[in-house]
Amino acid sequence: MPLREIQESVQQIAEAVASVLRVEVEIADHHLLRIAGTGQTQPGVLRTMAGEDHVYRSSLFAGQPVVITHPGEDDRCKPCMHYGNCAETGEICCPIQMDGKNVGVIGLLAFDPSQRERLFTDVDSILNFLQKIAELIASKLKEHLMYVEQQLTLEKLRVLMDELDKAMLIVDQSDRIVQANQRARQYLQLQTFATEGSARAKEWITAIRKVDSSGITPKKVMLAVGEEEKEFLFAIKPIQLEGTTREWVITIDDVREVVEIARQVGGFERQDAFSRIVGNSAAIAQAKEVARRVADSESTVLLYGESGTGKELFAKAVHQESQRRNLPFVSINCAAIPEHLLESELFGYEDGSFTGARRGGKIGLLEAASRGTIFLDEIGDMPLHVQGKLLRVLQEREIMRVGSTGRTIPLKARIIAATHHDLRSRVEQGAFRMDLFYRLYVIPIFLPSLKERREDILIIANDCLQRCSQRLGKNVIGFSQETQAILFHYDWPGNVRELANAIEYAVNMETSALIETKSLPLELREKRERVEVSGRTSTSDMNLPLNLKELERAAIQQALSQVEQTRGRKEDAAEWLGISRATLFRKIKEYGLS
């Protein structure tokens, strides 16, 4: 509660008192800093009174007035630097109190016989007057502090209003807009003209009041903003004081924005299906880009790569990004269906076509897909005689059921095939038809193995960890440094599928917040142990520093992906990584990340 904040007012009070009583006035705060002064004390204003503040100090601490009739001789003046040689001829001081606390001292000083006589002729009256002046100063300080608190509250209110997603106006009884938050200023373009008393603003309020009084719901109003008419939803509530309405709060929402939000919340806004494919390496990014470009095409797509690289996930993403997204997606694993059943499962069969056939026949999976998408997984393992029939289907775009006498069914579905085999080698070996190969090899998309995109390993591992921990109800949030190194350097012959299984195993085994090496599957731990036993720990593939750049890039990419999913800022990623914002942006540029 510093008196210094109202120094100008205190100085004016001191000068007024000095002119009335014709003595000198001195006022100090609770730190005994001279706040105001007249006559001989004025040059010391805003300077400490150290060394000459003993009488004021005793009055301040005791909370009582002090009268010194003989300065320089009074025992209470002994600590003063001017004791025995004081220029004053008399002194009366009184504490300034506010809410029970001493906040300063006011003193009346005499420096000659005439001032002394005026000071001590009626001491009781002088003390009573001095206490009233002290109360006046305290009330001035209290008024100032209340004003400061009020301004702070208003500023908090302004900041909170500006942070609201809703547009908010405060309107007075004359229908003037007295306050508008940032969203309202954007909606109504209030920054382009003065709002108070403007004809346009009054038109808005009049229109809002008219709709409000009509009782129509929902409350919608058309307002002329700039050169166009905009439709808003609104609500209006009174601000009352002692039962009297003083102002109104009006909140408005742009109808177009509300509809757009409803579309997104209701699932009408389609998310990028390829966002489910985790990873940002150049190889996987290229595969996603090609797949995204051909999603709406009718061309046949061939996905090839090692087992577990996510071929079905890619196929589903292509389907979801196509115009067929609301139609069936039929997945057929050509290696999982017994050879003698594969033909009938694919093409269907007619009633009585073979022993054990269902009465009435059965629709085939190619037919069941209708206008949707057929995913032929592991097509490289399809028997040769079925390959011939599939070739005819792709050429003629017609299906003939097993046992049919010639009736054909149009094939309207799109074909996506996948294999972990090198189909060219299978063609050379005679295990795959060359003509079918070229029918399928229209839009080939290579899906790299994990060891070919190691920078994605930790990103995928963390994604699996998050989903698995949530599903299993475990509070496992990350990996130890050593575990990260093992995951990064392991070759993952089973690719993403193997990695996901390893993470699920580790989440089940782990009892702490971080997955330690002891919780990893045996084959991962055994490889690490073999490396250590072989004496190649310092130079092996398991040695972290050998690929520090790759690990750093992966960690940064992982952090960026995490803040993107939570709609955070890049600054949050820097904090998560334990590096400065400048370092993060430099690394992003260095590694070509975004």
Image (cartoon, rainbow, N blue to C red):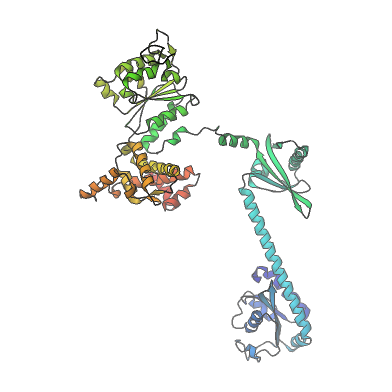
Q: Is residue 282 above or below residue 81?
A: above
Image coordinates of residue 557 in percent, x first then y, are: 41, 44
Query: Residue 487: image x %, image y %?
Result: 33, 44
Camera-side residue of 403 and 226: 403
* Quarter of the image with the C terminus in it: top left
Q: In the picture, residue 300 is in which quadrant?
A: top left
For the question of whether residue 336 can be seen, the reply is yes
Is any part of residue 539 visible from this angle?
Answer: no
Percent across and percent down for residue 358 are: 41, 16
User: Who's the residue at 72% across and 70% down the image?
Assistant: 139
Residue 405 drawn above or below residue 56: above
**Which of these two is toward me, 427 or 521?**
521
Q: 23 above or below 287? A: below
The reply, left or right, for residue 542 in relation to residue 463 is left
Q: Quadrant of residue 399?
A: top left
- Please identify the residue farthest to the left as the structure is shown: 534
